[in-house]
Amino acid sequence: MRVFTRWCNQKLQQRGLKIEDWTTDVGDGITLIDLWEVASHKTVSGVNRKPGNKRFLKMANMTLLLDAIKRDGVPVVGITKEHLVEAQVDPVLELMWNLIRAYHLNHAAAGITSGSLDSKTEAYKGRTLRWVNDKLAGYSVKADDFKDSWRDGRTFCALVHALENDALNFASVAQSNAADALELAFAAAERHLGIPRLLDAADFAGDDAALPDEPSMLTYLAHFVNHTSSNFKILLTPRVHVPATEESKAPADLATGSHIHHRNAPPAVLPAPAGIVEQATSVVHFFFDRCAEHPEQHAFSVRREEFWRRKTWGQYRHMVCRAARAMISFGLKPGDRICIFGKSATRPEWNIFSLAAMAAGAIPCVGHSYNTAELLRILKQSEAPFLLLEKQSQWKKVRAELKAFPHLRLVIIKEPGNAGLGHDAVLTWRIFSRAGERLKGSRDTVIDALDAELEKRTKAIVPTDTACIVFTPGTESASADAPPRGKGVVLSHRSVLWTARRVAQSLGVTADDCYVSFLSSAQISEQLLALHVPILTGMSVFYVPEATMLHGCIKEVQPTILSAPPDFWLTSHHAMTESLPASGVAGLAPRVRKQLGCGRVRHALVGGNSQPVARAVVDFFAELGVRLVHCYGQAETCGLLTWTLDNNKPTTAAAEGPDQQLVAVGEALPECEFKVAADDGEILVRGPHLFTEYFQDPALTAQARSADGWFRTGDVGRLDSQGHLVWLGRRADAIQLADGRVVHPAALEAALRCIPLMRNALVVGKGREFLAALLIVDVALMKRAAKKRNCLPKKLLGSTDFQAQLKAIAETEAMTATGLKKWSIVPRSLTIKR
């Protein structure tokens, strides 16, 4: 009974509830309904939340509960609403065991998909023991049952050690008594694996009759199974070699006929670095652990004038706690949302503010602020009481519409100066961050109280809580007549940490690595690399303050991991090809790499999916010794789904046509899967890193997910000859010509961007007889090239050499076959506003 109670309370803590006494705490139906909703991820409608002492209202609640449970296929035979209202212990415990078996024991992961709940449970028991013993291979223990094999604690310790070697010292267990070994195992499982303590050493004291029963043991061990559920079915499969057949080489999804591609486990050659834990409680828990264990280690550096200012993890913690105390003192409540809007790159303050908000129980919301309308839309939708801005100019825009935001209580501006122009609710970052130390009254007493409240809120965070909300740009419409709208993508701590761990593990990130951050934190991929991966691994981060300083900073730092959008690699390619001698990079590769800032780089990542990098650019960097790793993902996939990390050589998408300029974006992350729909080519995704929901938009959430858990990305793709994904573009960007042909312009635009001096390309022609292209010039590069040739920039564009190169690319058979017949050069840079 104790284990069932602990399991229930672990679920109920998400609702702020706890069962102390079964005879008094469950009779009104509210607690049991909340428990079922949390366990099943479904809701019960029509519940009376204040039944009082009215028995008929309690009976009505129990009727709603039992009906919902039966609809979900969970047996409730012999359990009546009278039993539950009267809190009769045996029927209530039978119901709890049925809920545990239905929602906690992962039958599907074990390959058990048919039969009654009783038969599934029997099969699950046997497969669990097989799974445990598979994990214990090489250890001097074995699990023959759910009782005697576990009483001395050594089997528990071996299982924890097998899943996480750093969790405990297994060699010392032999000298420990049973109570100490059990305590060590349960504590290590909770701390390092995120497995709640459903059992205690005291549960194993006494005679055989007092030992935990089989349901209790199975409930606890299911947490270990769920911890690695993606590997469960594979480990339980009989180890018999079955020759591959044509039918078995590529299993097809029955609904669409599309081939499903997935990765079941990390590659054996890429072990998890020390210090990375498989499943975590929350981002902030790991952050505080990192700071406590390595307070003197370099965390990040910020460029100030001519120098890099170094901050340690201990200093990082101090800044986060100070900001969190300030938030609480200004009235931030658990569950509140705070908004962060930067106009350019990620600042360390953005991450400090995010971590402080998480620690205080709030939810950071990060959004793009390309224009005033975008900023105001997100601020209104999020209903955030706190707002962090980068510039005074942003505040002026908000202030003009202040009446539309009655929820807004405090605005913090990063830019120093006369913040708020006299408005009481506006502070500079410096003043705000000191508010956690400079409070009225007795400072120590107030700070102690704030620290106690902060600790309480931090401890209350669970893996399924929301870690952040990423607001996407409002660039797409729900229909042709509707205005563009963005989406609030809700990501849990579990999803964020799972993805960060897979990235860190696959890249082999350690504390010796360094990363240059210059992209916007509105991109979840940048949050992963600048915030979450460093927390797990200790990788140091260097923040670039201004875009104009980017290349200089990268050259100074010489990072080991570099992530940049396609535009960065394209402009670097154009600039270097313009300055290289006619012989190319022969003999110059090391010097050119260092000049680019890639002298030490181990992984050069290409992020973003709006502008695929052309094959010619990839080949150029490969010749330099810099292999570009293509990444594909969306905010809904926590920033990453596939990449070319495991490929020895990136592959082209097709043997002919404009798609040959595109490079495959690789294989799925371990334990994730994708497929390309047979009817329209849409990319569908499934995995543990998917978003929770769209913020305050259940209709859009339901529309984005299929009944069997596939997320509809809205992107179109295909598979290359190696089965790797090739991203072709957004489905909404497809151009249908007058003759009915559908063209995805991404491949054409990628090829056109390879034309010397071009910064971008835009293909148009919806409903027309042919396609046309706007070619946007890289103005800075054009001026440098014109100066080198001692001519005016406009004359350079009209030169015979340039026109010949343009014609050679634009009039190839691959281009004209798509219907591209005209193009026009735009001799100036274009922006979001222009």
Image (cartoon, helix red, strand yellow):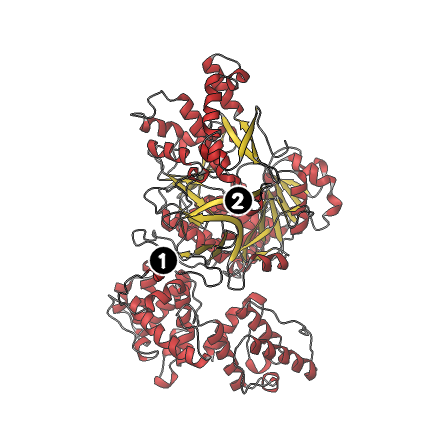
Numbered disc total = 2
Question: Which of the 4 image quadrants contains residue 51?
Answer: bottom right
Look at the picture and state if 622 lies above or below 435: above
- Specify the label residue 641 is tagged with: none
Look at the picture and state if 479 lies above or below 400: below
Spot occupied by residue 514 in the image (x, y as percentages of width and height): 39, 40
| Tag 1 residue | 265
Residue in the picture at 37% in, 81% down: 211
Residue in the picture at 55% in, 17% down: 794
Q: Which residue, as the protein is rendered here, is positioned at the far top?
A: 790
Label 1 to label 2: alpha-carbon separation: 26 Å
Spot occupied by residue 791 in the image (x, y as percentages of width and height): 50, 13
Q: Tell me which amino acid carries mark 2.
A: Gln
Spot occupied by residue 269 in the image (x, y as percentages of width and height): 29, 51
Look at the picture and state if 38 lies above or below 696: below
> How many C-alpha atoms fall within 10 Å of the one at disc 2: few (<14), some, or many (≥20)?
many
Can residue 593 be spotted in the picture? yes
Image side of residue 358 versus residue 833, left or right: left
Q: Which residue, as the protein is rendered here, is positioned at the far right?
A: 403
Q: Secondary structure at mark 1?
A: loop
Circles 1 and 2 in contact, beta carbons < 8 Å? no
| Tag 2 residue | 523
Q: Tell me which amino acid carries mark 1.
A: Ala
First in sequence: mark 1 vs mark 2: 1
Can residue 302 be spotted in the picture? no
Closest to the observer, 770 or 639: 770
Image side of residue 500 versus residue 426, left or right: left
Closest to the observer, 147 or 825: 825
Task: Identify the image quadrant of the C terminus.
Answer: top right
> How many C-alpha atoms fall within 10 Å of the one at disc 1: few (<14), some, or many (≥20)?
some
Q: Secondary structure at mark 2?
A: loop
Spot occupied by residue 636 in the image (x, y as percentages of width and height): 53, 52
